[in-house]
Image (tube, grey):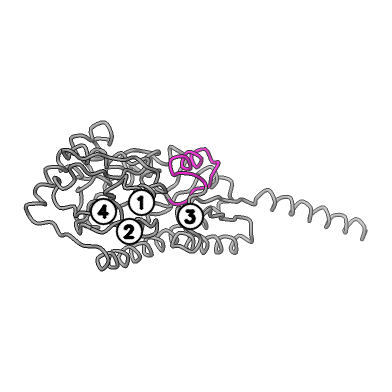
Amino acid sequence: MLRLLSGAVTALALVLTSTLAQAATTVTLHTPGPADGAWGKVFRAWGNVVSKKTAGAVKLDPVFDGKLGNEQAVIELVKKGEAGGGFFTTRGLSQLDQAVLALQVRGAFGSWSEFDAARGRIESDLIAAWQRQNVELVGWSDVGIGRFMSRGFPVTDPSSLASKKVAVFDGDVITPKLVAAIKGSSTVNLDVNAILGGLEKKQVDVVAAPAYAAEQLGWTSRLDHINTRPLFFAAGAVVLSRQQLAKMTDEQRALVLSTGKRAAKMLDKKLDGLGYDSYERLKGKLETHTPTEAELAAWRKVFEDECRRLDGTVPKAALEKTGACR
């Protein structure tokens, strides 16, 4: 009898061990920054909570410094369930649905409140479109306010960019439309990690980016002017593969999503604070230019031309809903 009981216990232990092993899920997360940066700190904290509360059955595995690949390639892996998810800007998110690009139209919004209201008008559409691509929105974590920064001259009105070369990140389809509306200006297409080299070699004169990103990537060491007018509000989001989520139990999935929402909110707050601090530092290091009313009027004409050139690039319905091309 004891031998039978012992055998049953052993068999049960083997079954439980096998079940736990099958239930164990590792979710690989794309992160653009280093382990000790904002993304690294928040994602590791999120992973620690998930691992503890699931007794190790679900593990989040952040891969730092964008080492999984560029955003466009990684989001394709997420769609297929071959990567777990992570943080993406609109360069990656637009692979799911180009409607998100309406939020990145240059000159469209003057404040975070305007931007947030515009996003709210298309959020349900984005969520539904992303879900059809097997991707779940966990939460928004925006990168910051993009502004013109330049080398050797101030960006004042559009004519100040004549004969100047503006950096365009891989996957950015909006900036080329803006630059095309400025007579004599041109673009230089580079990977994000190649822009510092482009500045050093004087292949690039101008970048348009959030202050924190420009500092972290070392660009500001090669720039000497910054325009104070917000050019765009850089959207970002934490997303997860629905196929990876489907591997979890209902309880595990609910935990990952609820803690993920808190992590995304924490990251958004961190990036907001870091962006503000970076901009304040840059105002002390770089020469600032605040546009005059006449310069703003000239830019408005360029933004109108930019919008006309977006036809076929950004869905018209998204432009209308967000009010990006008023």
**Quadrant position of the C terminus in the picture:** top left
- Identity of the residue furthest to the left in this view: 294
- Circle 3 Cα neighbour tier, 10 Å, few/some/many (<14 / 14–19 / ≥20): some
First in sequence, mark 3 or 1: give its number: 1
Q: Does the stretch in magenta take in 71?
A: yes
First in sequence, mark 4 or 3: give its number: 4
Residue 195 as seen in the image, left or right of residue 50 = left
First in sequence, mark 1 or 2: give its number: 1
Residues in magenta?
Answer: 68-87
SS type, badge 3:
helix
Q: Quadrant of residue 149?
A: bottom left
Residue position marked by numbered label 2 in the rendering: 220
Residue position marked by numbered label 4 in the rendering: 151
Q: Does the stretch in magenta take in 57?
A: no
- Residue closer to the observer: 35 or 273: 35
Tell me where residue 247 appears, x and y as whole percent.
59, 46
Q: Are marks 4 and 1 in contact (CB under 8 Å)?
A: no
Separation of disc 4 and disc 2 at Cα? Answer: 9 Å
SS type, badge 4:
loop
Which numbered disc covers residue 200? 1
Q: How many marks?
A: 4
User: What residue is drawn where x is 51% and y is 64%?
Assistant: 45
- Residue closer to the observer: 7 or 87: 87
Residue position marked by numbered label 3 in the rendering: 257
Tell me where residue 152 appears, x and y as whole percent.
23, 54
Which numbered disc covers residue 165? none
First in sequence, mark 2 or 3: give its number: 2
